[in-house]
Amino acid sequence: MNKGLKRSFQFCLLLFVVGLGGMLWLFVQRDPFAVSLLPVNEQHTIAESVKALQVSTSTADVILSPSQSDQTSIRLSGRVVQARKDDLQLNSEVTPDGTLHVEVRELREMEMLWTDNRYLQLEIFLPATETGYDSVHIQTSTGDIQTGALSAKRGDIRSSTGDILVGGFTGEEVELATQTGDIILENLRAALRAKSSTGDVEVRRMPEFVHDVSIATNTGDVELSVIAQPTSARLRLLSDTGDVRVDWPQVMETDTAPALSVETVTGDIWIQ
């Protein structure tokens, strides 16, 4: 009886070892975490005249580029998990006031299982206008935002964890905000309010300093450069533990000059 039990135990142990070996072989031969991805390629063409833009996404990156025609076009591309492709929706609508609303909807299950925003990209191609747009509003949760040169009265661009890169802004005011991402803004011709908790903020090649600029970070560095260095400005540059450097040798403090306010806790500040 004992011999029979012993043999049964040895046989079961042998089956366990063989099965474990097979699983290890499969683990080595292929990626156990690989999932099936399906391509996404959806396009919308907007026939109506667009006066303002409002964009909302969750994980998708957003890219704004100039259109090669007089129409606005939208393209959503990338790859998604096969089981979640039907959960992905691209909605676009022009309201009576001329605002183009663009939304990439992702169900919460999809957001939890697939957060790699490299696989999903929303591109919007905007035609140039003589007077610029009334407003441009873009908001994402984890996606990056990248735009070419924008012309609008007001701009509001936000991402929770993504980076923001704006290739130029001409208008009255633009606001940029991210929690952990970096902010890069070039060729600014408007008032600016920028805020990032842990990311860096860099304002490159401002043609001239003629509008108020306010920048705030917690741990990120701040760098601002102006091509035609000003002779007057109202400066407020504060860093608790970081270095502060100003390379404007001719600047004078006057009450009527534009204000430059930069505040950070541990980051460095460099104005040039």
Image (cartoon, rainbow, N blue to C red):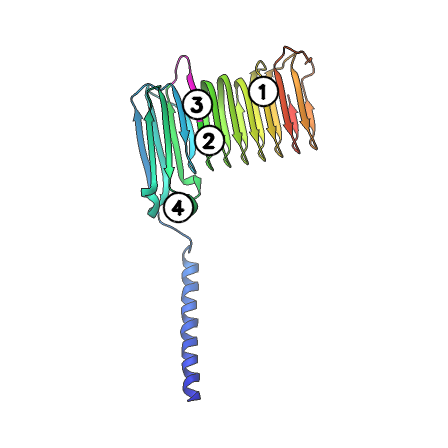
Count neighbours of disc 1 (C-alpha within 10 A) and say few if under 14, some if 14 to 19, many if 20 or more.
some
Q: From the image, tell me which residue sits under label 2.
A: 145
Label 2 – label 4 distance at C-alpha: 23 Å
Q: Amino acid at mark 1?
A: Val
Q: Left or right: where does residue 244 sit relative to residue 148?
A: right
Q: Residues within 10 Å of mark 2 (few under 14, many from 20)?
A: many
Which label's residue is closer to the chain start, 2 or 4?
4
Which residue was labeled with disc 1? Answer: 213
Marker disc for residue 109: 4
- The residue pinned by badge 3 equals 136
Query: Dots 2 and 1: beta carbons under 8 Å?
Result: no
Kind of residue at disc 3: Val
- Helix, strand or loop at mark 1: strand
How far apart are the alpha carbons under marks 2 and 1? 21 Å
Q: Quadrant of the N terminus?
A: bottom left
Choose between 245 and 31: the one closer to the eye. 245
Query: Does the magenta-highlighted stretch encompass residue 189?
Result: no
Residue drawn at x 44%, y 28% as measured from the top left: 138
* Magenta residue span: 128-137
First in sequence, mark 2 or 1: give its number: 2
Q: Please report contact status of discs 4 and 1: CB closer than 8 Å, yes or no.
A: no
Give amino acid for label 4: Glu
Check disc 3: other Cα within 10 Å, few if <14, some if 14-19, many if 20+. many
Q: Position of residue 79 (x, y in %)?
A: 37, 41
Residue density around tag 4, few if under 14, some if 14–19, many if 20 or more, within 10 Å: few
Task: State how far apart marks 3 and 4 are (Cα).
Answer: 30 Å
